Image (cartoon, rainbow, N blue to C red):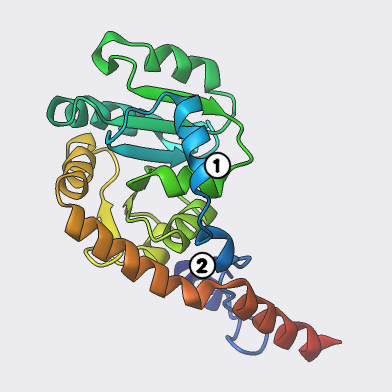
Amino acid sequence: MLNREDLLAAKGFGLIEGENLFLVHGVGVDLDEYSRKKPGRLAGIRLELGLPEGAPVVSCIAELIPRKNHRQLFEAWVDVRRKFPRAVLLVVGTGELEQRLRRAAEGRQFGGSIRMLGYRNDVPELLALSDLVVLASWHEGLPRVVMEAMAAAKPVVATAVRGSRDLVRNGKSGLLVPLERPDLLAEALLRLLGDRTLACEMGAAGRELMREYSLERVLREMDVIYHRYL
């Protein structure tokens, strides 16, 4: 199991933790990959994406499918732009809703503030450029993008759903908000964009928490499980 809620559900079917049921901390995150400094590379990406110097940057890295709930994020972004008109939202990913979301991003209310980036292979660099990361999913298993964001010491705003609840300590490493409340999602984004000290503190707390989800730890966990049955 990758999250505690699934673990509890599995126990309800008679499985026994430590015997035929195990909690594994995801697939593991290479913490070093998200802490390397690449100033030249970052400057090039900033120029490529047309990010104004000093503009707040929020990233959403997720497949463009209904489950990821970009609709709630876009609704919240209208409110964010009222207070931070220079803010930029980076939407990374592909999927069945790509064309629909691209059309929505072109809406006058967004004023060109949403960058639809499609598929990217430079996620660590995009996270390094971001002030915070947002994920508004309807449900998750154990969202890798949240782990990557926290490994990069970025605060996370996420919907309070299974999986995300395992990773985001509300008020410590990020903020959790209810589904179907774009107003509260906007409020959480505004809180972190408006308080740089708080955002940095939450980012640092998330980075520390990710030691539990490091690649080295997960490999040790899997080694124990495999050796049990081989």
Instruction: Return the disc, 2 or 1, that comes first in the chain's sequence.
Output: 2
Instruction: Please name the residue shown 67% across and 84% down the image.
Output: 220
What's the distance in space between the residues labelled 2 and 1, CA to CA?
Answer: 40 Å
- Numbered tag placed on residue 6 in the rendering: 2
Q: Secondary structure at mark 2?
A: helix
Q: Position of residue 149 (x, y in %)?
A: 44, 55
Q: In the rendered view of the protein, which quadrant contains the N terminus?
A: bottom right
Q: Position of residue 170 (x, y in %)?
A: 26, 63
Q: Amino acid at mark 2?
A: Asp
Instruction: Please name the residue shown 23% across and 41% down the image.
Output: 185
Q: Are marks 2 and 1 in contact (CB under 8 Å)?
A: no
Residue 125 in sight in this render: yes
Residue sticking out furthest to the top: 108
**The one of 101 and 141 positioned closer to us in this rendering:** 101
Q: Is residue 56 left or right of residue 125?
A: left
Does residue 102 lie above or below 82 as drawn?
Answer: above
Does residue 163 lie above or below 70 as drawn?
Answer: below
Q: Amino acid at mark 1?
A: Arg
Q: How many marks?
A: 2
**The one of 143 and 84 positioned closer to us in this rendering:** 84
Residue 54 falls in which quadrant of the image? top left
**The one of 201 and 73 positioned closer to us in this rendering:** 201
Q: On the image, numbered disc 1 is attached to which residue?
A: 41
Query: Counting other residues with Cα less than 10 Å from the Cα at mark 1, is it few (<14), some (14-19), or many (20 or more)?
Result: few
